[in-house]
Amino acid sequence: MTQSSLPDESEIRALVGHEFPGGRYTIAHWENFLLTECTGAPPLPGDLAHPVALFHMPILGAQTSIGEMFALGQAESDFSIGIESYDWEFFAPMREELEYDVTGRITSAERREEDGRTFDRIQFQFDLHEPDNRHAARTTITWHYRRNLT
């Protein structure tokens, strides 16, 4: 990627405040079983859901996709994305078979240069609420959209 093919910095900054359509998501019992099994952990008691569900549940529940998140930041390729962090906050135990209301938005988007490399740092925030509107969880995903890869 050449310097002239960089997305305009103002386009990246303008992503702040972008909201995903939002929606609902229920962690099915079978899904929780498989997710727990793949981590090598024993099943959690009762209807508790394994926290690993927060990798995909908020994105799907907010009616978006990894592909759309790549496209919003104008990723050159799948290989141009770097993960800075996935931060999970739990305000209530996650449960199977409970329908969560999910919202999502972009909370930060900026161009950075470090060690001679240019990247756009974009932060996505997803919030999950229980049917009674109690805040259940928040996940904050921060990715680097690397530029100047060639």
Image (cartoon, grey):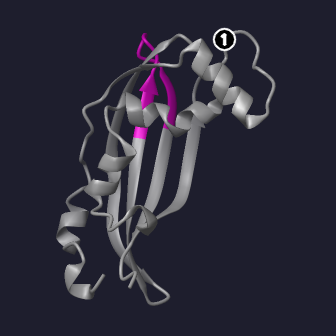
Q: Position of residue 26 (x, y in %)?
A: 47, 17
Counting from the top left corner in percent of width and height, residue 126 is at 41, 38
Crowd rating for badge 1 (residues with CA inside 10 Å; few <14, some 14–19, many 20+):
some
Vertical comparison of 45 with 69: above or below: above
Residue 48: quarter of image: top right
Between 137 and 59, the residue placed more toward the observer is 59
Q: Which amino acid does label 1 sit on?
A: Asp
- Closer to the camera, 67 or 20? 67
Residue at image x 55%, y 50%? 86
Q: Name the residue under label 1.
A: 47
Q: Is residue 93 visible?
A: no
Q: Is the magenta stretch mostly helix, strand or loop?
A: strand
Q: Please tell me which residue is depicted at 33% across the width and 64% down the height of the picture.
A: 75
Measuring from the top left, give residue 123's x and y in whole percent: 40, 55
Magenta-drawn stretch contains 133: yes
Name the spot of residue 125 as percent of width and height, x first: 41, 44
Asked if residue 59 shows in the view, the reply is yes
Which residue occupies 39% across, 46% down?
Answer: 66
Q: Which range is magenta? A: 126-138
Query: Is 22 displayed left or right of 59 in the figure?
Result: left
